[in-house]
Amino acid sequence: MRYPGGKGGAGVVQRIISLMPPHRRYIEPFLGGGAVFYAKRPAEASIVADVDADLIRYHQLQRQPCTEYRVADALDLVPSLNLTVSDLVYLDPPYHPATRAKAKLYNHELDAHHHSLLLAMLQELKCHVILSGYRCAEYDAALASWWSEDYRTMTRGGPRVETVWCNFLPGAAFHDTRYLGGNFRERERIKRKRDRWASRFAAMPAAERAVIAEALALANQQQILSTEPARVASHTASP
């Protein structure tokens, strides 16, 4: 589904999903076209929302399992959810007015004042948060302590540089490993390596497999615990 500001550009969805830490519940309050939601590995439960009722009715027809659909304003919905460290909120709000050439781009806009309210709300959340958008002075100031990365994407108006911000340091543990790698070639290299190691593991004696599996499970659990949301040292990666 094509949608203004959608994340259907080459490699964009894959990069965003590759940043996601393990989570039991997934919340996306600016659903739009839903490119990230439909591509990621489902969580145990998901809540997806948009203020556009017609858009939500369309998505309800897709009948995604374990998903709750809501017609709601993100500023009302997110604070009402009693979010914890086992939750992930991904937000792709309408672009800040200061960052775009066209004043009117969405059926339901988010003005500068409501962007300020959104940023203030995000600072208070205790769960994992990933936010997409274009850099502007207000975002850079409010999210100065968050990890961020710039990436190039193609829009209807031509190439742009978008940014993704996280209130945690990504890379310690992953919800969905299918998209790890900076590009298609790297992702294929990782998959081939995975398959080789899996074959070697399957060929080991059962006792050795048990020892190695236990050690890997312990190491993975320690990494998951290390991804608890925190104000990380400011880090910016360039495209």
Image: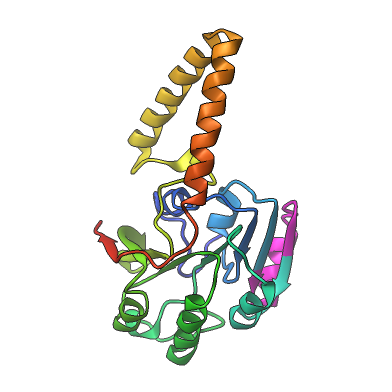
> Percent from the top left, x then y, of residue 109?
51, 84
Residue 61 is inside the magenta segment: yes
Q: Is residue 77 left or right of residue 98?
A: right
The residue lying furthest to the left in this view is 238
Q: Residue at x 56, y 27 (%)?
A: 214
Closest to the observer: 51 or 105? Answer: 51
Q: Is residue 69 left or right of residue 203?
A: right
> Percent from the top left, x then y, of residue 35?
54, 57
Closest to the observer: 31 or 175? Answer: 175
Classify the position of the C terminus by image quarter.
bottom left
Closest to the observer: 112 or 159? Answer: 112
Please say if 193 is above or below 44.
Answer: above
Report which quarter residue 9 is drawn in. Answer: bottom left
Please say if 234 is above or below 111.
Answer: above
Q: Is residue 198 left or right of residue 153?
A: right
Query: How many numbered dots are placed on residues in this image?
Result: 0
> Percent from the top left, x then y, of residue 3?
52, 66
Report which quarter residue 184 is drawn in. Answer: top left
Q: Residue at x 63, y 78 (%)?
A: 79
> Percent from the top left, x then y, of residue 68?
74, 63
Note whether residue 57 is visible.
no
Please say if 234 is above or below 107.
Answer: above
Magenta region, residue range = 49-68
Q: Residue at x 62, y 59 (%)?
A: 26
Residue 158 is inside the magenta segment: no
Q: Is residue 234 left or right of residue 225?
A: left
Report which quarter residue 167 is drawn in. Answer: bottom left
Note whether residue 173 is visible.
yes
